[in-house]
Amino acid sequence: MKVGGINVFPGVVAVVVTLAIWFVIPVPDGVSSNAWHLLALFVGTIVAIIGKVMPIGAIAVLAITLVALTGVTNDSPSGAIKDALSGFSNSLIWLIGIAIMISRGLAKTGLGNRIGYYFISLFGKKSIGVGYALAISELIIAPVTPSNTARGGGIMHPIMKSIATSFGSSPEEGTSRKIGHYLALVNYHINPITSAMFITATAPNPLIVKLIADATGADISITWGTWALAALLPGLVCIALVPLVVYAIYPPEVKSTPDATVFAQNKLNEMGALSYGEKVMVFVFALLLILWAGVPAMLLGPDFVVNTTAVAFLGLSVLLVTGVLNWDDVLKEKSAWDTVVWFSALVMMATFLNKLGLVGWFSNVVQGSIAQLGFGWEVSALILVVVYFYVHYFFASTTAHITAMFAAFYSAGLLLGAPPLYLGLLLAGASSLMMSLTHYATGTSPIIFGSGYVSMENWWVMGFIMSLVNLSVWGIVGGLWWKALGYW
């Protein structure tokens, strides 16, 4: 039941949980009352997000309001509102917001579709080749599309559906298993992997960077280039495996697809030569990657280091000056502004939970529980990552999951002796890879699942299988790769 802008039942649950933690559950020894009360607001916010009480941006506004009014972070009213709004000053939040605005150019100019159809024209003679074409296309656009939903659901999924339809594969006609079932699963399971490969490939990744820096006193500050290099090998291995694993479990009825290359080529012919807007997007795309990867600093020295968020602003400025995007496009990019608001609220609450000592207290509890098992840090870290990963069955938002659990689990792993950068990279990868599990795990999943090509049973089976594959690759291949890079 919905009253006004609120879903009543989950709203009541969120309020009851908040009040119970605030007033009923005793404040544990070693925890301040302010920290405990902020935890009550934080948990209530997470419950509200999971229960979809209101849009996440609206929930974030309520959270900011409550932090300011209750004074849980500061006894001074002016100090409390300053604390409540402090998340908006975080540059990583603006990195994601601006990058989402930039990614609007992919859709507006048609460059995203062109990339997809180009690779299908090259590799689409076999159904598995179409799968790889979708994978490569998503990988290429991932660094500049911080909304994994927009990338996997908004750009790649329509291309996937058009290919399936061209082969007479549709849920309505009962012909999903011809090729649509296979392509939908590939379309989806590539999305968590590309999200794990770049800081700018999904919105919560910068939050992870901040949480790691906070937990290590800024000793570990992961740059865009460090993240991308670390994820390069395990990410490419996972991408190479997805079309093969899906093919082995759920092979399509149509194996040979020579018409797919013809279909894609016809689409490219309809689009014609690269437009002015597409050429500018290619230039901006290359500029962002070069600067984010720190190439000028590598070649010319540390004086040429450019802030990652400043680079994003530069890219958006170029698009505005050249007219590829106009200010109305920026204002209409609701997902970007929405992300800035909810991201700011969650970062603010997570930051003050750490400052007030709550994260440290909970980390000690988790660390003590695992330490009693008597394992070394290697097995202990594995237990932490596995629990963190599979708890996502109970979350419908990666953002809510990461905000609720990442800091405590990461800090607990440090206490157990795990190398800081190794553990951070492993948990960071898991934070995106866990999207593979369910049909509600992230915003992309209901879009692709909702197209009807894959049953819930097949979705969950494939999700669990891919979770085992991806975690194994990230843990083993990734761990060895990071060792070779000297990260631990």
Image (cartoon, rainbow, N blue to C red):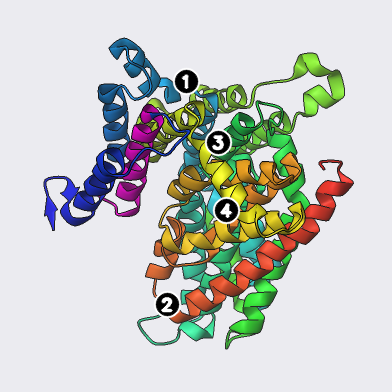
- How far is the residue under mark 1 from the one under mark 4? 25 Å
Which mark is first along the chain, 1 or 2? 1
The one of 315 and 472 positioned closer to us in this rendering: 472
Real-space Cα distance between discs 4 and 3? 24 Å
Q: Does the magenta stretch include residue 39?
A: yes
Left/right placement of residue 4 relative to residue 307 reads left
**Residue 211, horizontal then vertical, whole percent:** 57, 35
Q: Residue at image x 34%, y 17%? A: 80
Identify the image quadrant of the C terminus. top right
Instruction: Report if residue 134 lies within the magenta region.
Output: no
The residue that label 2 is drawn on is 456
The residue under label 4 is which amino acid type?
Ser
Numbered circle sitting on residue 360: 3
**Label 3 neighbourhood size at 10 Å, few (<14), some (14-19), many (20+)?**
many
All told, the count of numbered labels is 4
Dot 3 falls on a residue whose secondary structure is helix
Neighbours of disc 2 within 10 Å: few (<14), some (14-19), many (20+)? few
Amino acid beneath label 3: Gly
Q: What residue type is labelled 2?
A: Met
Q: Which residue bears the numbered disc 1?
A: 89
Kindly check if marks 1 and 4 are in contact, taking CB atoms under 8 A apart as contact: no
Write down the region rendered in magenta.
Answer: 33-56
Q: Main secondary structure of the magenta part?
A: helix
Mark 1 or mark 4: name the one nearer the start of the chain: 1
Q: In this view, does 210 lie above or below 46?
A: above
Q: Considering depth in this image, is 18 or 481 the residue closer to the camera?
A: 18
Whether 144 is drawn above or below 301: the answer is below
* Residue position for label 4: 432
